[in-house]
Image (cartoon, rainbow, N blue to C red):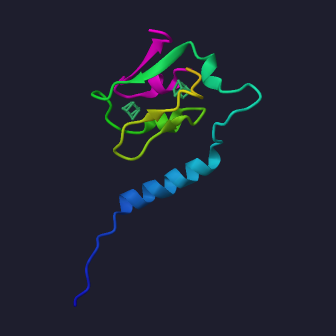
Amino acid sequence: MGLVYEPVDLEREAFEDLRGFIEKLLSKPAPGSAGRTGAWRLYRPAVDAGRCIKCGICWLYCPDDVISWAPKGLPIIDYSYCKGCGICSSVCPVKAIDMVLEGE
Ligand code: SF4
Ligand code: SF4
């Protein structure tokens, strides 16, 4: 029985290290004295899945850490805590996030 060669994906390992480091710096959204902060929102970020290039920049910049994202995946926004600040929409390089008035 011979050895099986498994190539090491250095780029992915470096990314996972960076991701772990960033996640340690971020606080996680949770109900506080103000309740679920998503109720404050006037505009809701809506991701256009067809336009999104799955780069994760919105996940990186969301000040409330309410965007979940896995490499090569679509971002998922937790609307219970998203305040609708629009930063994700501003930083998206392909304009795949529209800010839509709540109720529309
Ligand atoms: S609108 Fe603001 S709080 Fe909501 S997902 Fe985008 S960056 Fe985060
Ligand atoms: S920044 Fe834009 S393109 Fe990148 S993952 Fe977020 S929605 Fe998709």
Tell me the quarter of the image containing the N terminus: bottom left
On screen, residue 103 above or below 4: above
Split into quadrants, the picture shows ligand 2 in the one at top left
Q: Residue at x 53, y 27 (%)?
A: 79
- Residue 94 screen position, x and y as percent: 34, 26
Check the image and name the residue furthest to the bottom: 1
Residue 96 magenta: yes
Please give the range of residues in magenta: 85-104
| Residue 53, picture quadrant | top left
Tell me the quarter of the image containing the C terminus: top left
- Residue 18 screen position, x and y as percent: 50, 53
Check the image and name the residue furthest to the right: 33
Q: Residue at x 37, y 28 (%)?
A: 93
- Residue 81 screen position, x and y as percent: 60, 29
Q: Residue at x 57, y 48 (%)?
A: 23
Q: Which residue is at the front of the view, 56 or 28?
A: 28
Left or right of residue 22: residue 30: right
Q: Which residue is at the front of the view, 91 or 47?
A: 47
On screen, residue 8 above or below 47: below
Q: Residue at x 34, y 68 (%)?
A: 8
